[in-house]
Amino acid sequence: MNCMKKIGFVLVTFFLASSAAIAQDVVSDTIAKTYGDYWVDADEGNSKVLNKSRFGDNWFFGVHVGTNYNWGSYQTHSSFWKKIRPTFALSLGKWFSPYVGGRLVGSYLSNRGVQEKHNNQKWGAISGNGDLLFSFTNLFNGYKESRPFNLVGVLGLGVERTFSFKDLGVRNDPRTKDWFLSGRVGLMGIFRLGESWDFTAEATSTWLDDGYDAVKTHNRYDGHINLMLGFVHRFRNHDGSHQFTYALRDWGKIDILNSEINRLRQKAADDRAYAAAHPNINVVNTQQVNTLISFADDSAEIDQLQEVNVYTAAEAMKRLPKADLYITVLGKSTKNADLFMQRAQSIREVLMREYNIPAGRIYVEKDPALVESLDKTVDCVIMYINE
């Protein structure tokens, strides 16, 4: 297998593994109730529900420095301290979930080894690695937003390029410039410094083919051990956070919903009182279902926590075959007509696509007063959009 085929194999293998990791970024749709200030999932032992993240969330960038210890051929003929050399690295990565992440690492390594005549030799190398990261702390103890320390496993594949051998005996040897496949494994400790910064300490061991040090022996592998310290910056997410966060109840929106429920209850009580005072009025039994759906600021995307309200409206429409559904704004009038129409269209598309509600039974009305004036003897479902 030539060098380019080997490199291609490494990249394909890493991205297949990364795809499996990305698949773990799943937040359950079964949100049954709340615990304290958090939403919890009944299907997951009432565990707290993570806010849904986007592709641009939970990225990080790191700068790392440390030491490199080469364990190639003839190492017993050189002292331990002479083989300690500096290493520098940059990393860019993303956490796909609180448990699994990935990163790309570019490194410069200064190496020292021993050649056939037992003389010391120096050479340089550059490497590129794709690492999968596994948070053992979160896997076994559950995710906590402000945990001060996390222990992470590192499993990587990559390539290294050697160059600039200093020993005259091997300088002109064609093996002194070559590409090598590499595999590595290690552990990393992540110490939380603040909202967006971490300090990392990691130890990794890398395996390469014999000849990495330009010396062919009976050894099957050459390699090196790296001890690295670094600072990692976690970029800002779309919601302003720098990490995964749990879904909090928005008490302001719930208060608005409670106010609307109380208003409807009072209206129903007034209607009953009026009917009792006017016994000659024919009473017509009708059903009008009201529900409220909230959106994030300046967004027309239906949040996962609000999907239950769309489901409630769809079920009411199926239960009331003669009812129409009205989408309107909660309040006296809409403040942003364009944003309201985008949000209403998002709701309308979900009702038609996922619940098979006919388009002819769904109406969008910017003026809530017109919806309030509907014939009270006709079944209907009203969805209010909170601004």
Image (spheres, rainbow, N blue to C red):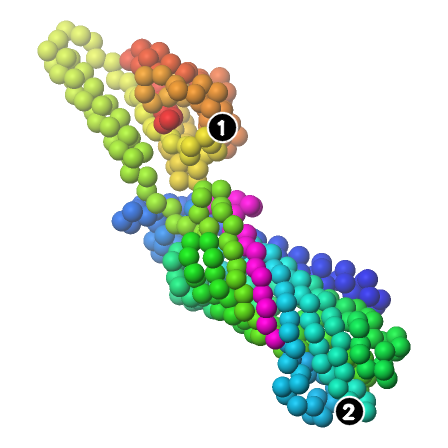
Q: Residue at x 41, y 29 (%)?
A: 314
300 lies above or below 110: above
Residue 365 picture quarter: top left
Q: Mark 1 against mark 2, which lies toward the viewer?
A: 2
Q: Nearer the viewer, residue 161 or 3?
A: 161
Q: Position of residue 370 (x, y in %)?
A: 35, 11
Query: Which residue does the numbered mark 1 point to in the structure image?
Result: 346
Q: Which residues are magenta?
A: 52-67
**Is residue 145 visible in the rendered structure shown here?**
yes
Q: Nearer the viewer, residue 50 or 232?
A: 232
Q: Position of residue 98 (x, y in %)?
A: 47, 57
Q: Is residue 18 left or right of residue 364?
A: right
Q: Tag 2: Cα neighbours inside 10 Å, few (<14), some, or many (≥20)? A: some
Q: Earlier in the sequence, mark 1 or mark 2?
A: 2
* 63 is within the stretch colored magenta: yes
Q: Is residue 166 left or right of residue 77?
A: right
57 lies above or below 358: below
Return the mark for residue 118: 2
Question: Mark 1 belongs to which amino acid?
Answer: Ser
